[in-house]
Amino acid sequence: MAICHGFTGSPLSMLPWAEYLASQGFAVSVPLLPGHGTSWQDLASTRWQEWYRTFEQSYLELAGQTRTCFVAGLSMGGAVALRVAAVHDVPGLVLVNPGLSFYDRRVKYVGALKYVMRTTTPIVEDSPAPETDETGDYSKTPLKSVHELKKLFRAATRGLPEVQAPALVFKSAVDGVIPPSSVATIERHIASSRLKVVTLPHSGHVATLDVDAPTIFEESARFFRQHAYDRVASESS
């Protein structure tokens, strides 16, 4: 499966999950998105379509080598995975605290604000999760990139009626980064009749590195096995 990291993040936040899935026999790809893993200045020079195309290409390459290829993502990576699932016939997708909306209402005006404010302070969440030793300098968040993120969220939301694949969504009970409205939007608009939402009671936003990570790892592996079997069985019948 192809797994997408989040905004200003890197594959390091996905590494324990990817390693667990690999140990279970799955082929896993976790690409580094453009503008990530370096600096906020680099991020500001990229567009959401570049983030999407990089992940989509990773998915297509792995799908060409395997019989079934799933998509998964954390936060912004969840929006990217949803977009791929709207365009391609994926057998299933797993999302962890997927982003489609913002807490900060000022994002409504970010298209104009980016011309008067170059950067803003990153969101810092109180969480039991350990520090993520991710690469790059993202001590500031470029508003130009927040605007790109907003456009990505809009594109992913528009594509929800095209997502037919089974979906497993993990949502932290307390998430200081992504509001509950994101999962509510998925529940309202996704075309799939096979949607399951699992609450993570003890984790913050980067739940793949938090207390409930084993739940994500184990349940996602079970989900992948079940739907890989279902896809192969349907193709053979």
Image (tube, rainbow, N blue to C red):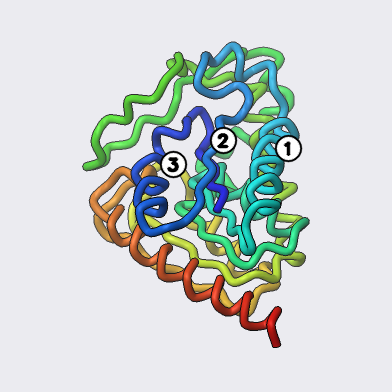
Please, what is the three-letter code of the amino acid marked with disc 2? Pro
Q: Residue at x 46, y 34 (%)?
A: 11
Left or right of residue 204: residue 192 = right
Question: For the residues marked 2 and 1, what is the alpha-carbon distance in whole angstroms?
Answer: 11 Å
Q: Residue 53 carries which label?
A: 1
Q: Residue 31 carries which label?
A: 2
Question: For the residues marked 1 and 3, what is the alpha-carbon distance in whole angstroms?
Answer: 24 Å
Left or right of residue 88: residue 32 = left
Please, what is the three-letter code of the amino acid marked with disc 1? Arg
Between 216 and 70, the one lying in front of the other is: 70
Task: Give the image quarter of residue 43.
Answer: top right
The picture places residue 62, in percent across and down from the top left corner, at: 63, 48
Please, what is the three-letter code of the amino acid marked with disc 3? Val
Q: Say which residue label 3 marks.
A: 177
Instruction: Tell us which disc is closer to us: 1 or 3.
Output: 1
Q: For the C terminus, which image quadrant? A: bottom right
Of helix, strand and loop, which one carries label 1?
Answer: helix
Of helix, strand and loop, which one carries label 2?
Answer: loop
- Badge 2 crowding class, 10 Å Cα cut-off, few under 14, some 14 to 19, many 20 or more, is some
